Image (tube, helix red, strand yellow):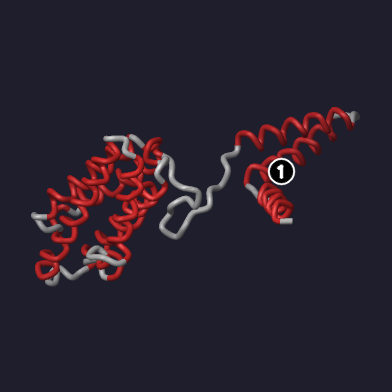
Amino acid sequence: MATDAEGFGAFRDFLASRPNLVGLAAFIVVFLGVGLLSDSILAAFLAAALGYTAGLILTPAHRRTYSSGLPVRGATRQEMDGRLAEFRQRVRSHRAQLPPDSQHDLSLITAHLGEMIDRWDLVQQAPEQRLSIESLVYQYLPSTLDVFLQLPDSAKPAAAPEWTRQLQLLATEVSRSRDTVLKHDLESMRTNGRVLEQKFEDGDLKMFRENGL
């Protein structure tokens, strides 16, 4: 029964998918167009079938995402590269508003994340590691940067030491994760992924999520 339900769900998702809808639209347009120009229903049907197939194949599927923008089924290397590049650009654009002591840690974090993303095929073999890195790039880093930048300029100096300390803790954990990826140690990668996620959920780094500090 569960298999039947899953199969029906997959079929329903396909019917509602963007490629199928585009293909159906192409089928109708081509069928009507060829049908008006030709007396052959068969010719119109065959041309419409080709139109449907082209629409189905050439239309990229819509990817479901979480509110952070992270694809539900995981990010590709290209998507991770793009998100990290966006974060780096934002850091460069707001450099004057960030604590000077944070610059080194931000550079270290993004450099080590970049090295892990370059080895994304390997990282994906350790789901815990992959999820923690995706969370960093899509959620935690952008969120903590947003919160700090939104502070009034008068409040930034008081918040800077704690924010910088949290970045230092994060840089340490990211460095450990990067080292295990470079060593191709899958078991350590899984462990580091859980540790990094735990840091955000229950440990010192929970302030990134709760208060941005």
Image side of residue 140 versus residue 65, left or right: left
- Residue 188 spot, x, y in % from top left: 31, 45
- Residue 200 spot, x, y in % from top left: 30, 62
* SS for callout 1: helix
Image quadrant in which you'd find residue 39: top right
- Residue 120 spot, x, y in % from top left: 37, 38
Image side of residue 10 versus residue 87, left or right: right
Image quadrant in which you'd find residue 207: bottom left
- Residue 122 spot, x, y in % from top left: 38, 36
The residue drawn where x is 27% and y is 35% is: 183
Of the pair 203 and 85, the residue shown nearer to us: 203
Image quadrant in which you'd find residue 144: bottom left
Q: Label 1: few (<14), some or many (≥20) within 10 Å? A: some
The residue drawn where x is 43% and y is 45% is: 75
Q: Which residue is mark 1?
A: 25
The residue drawn where x is 32% and y is 53% is: 136
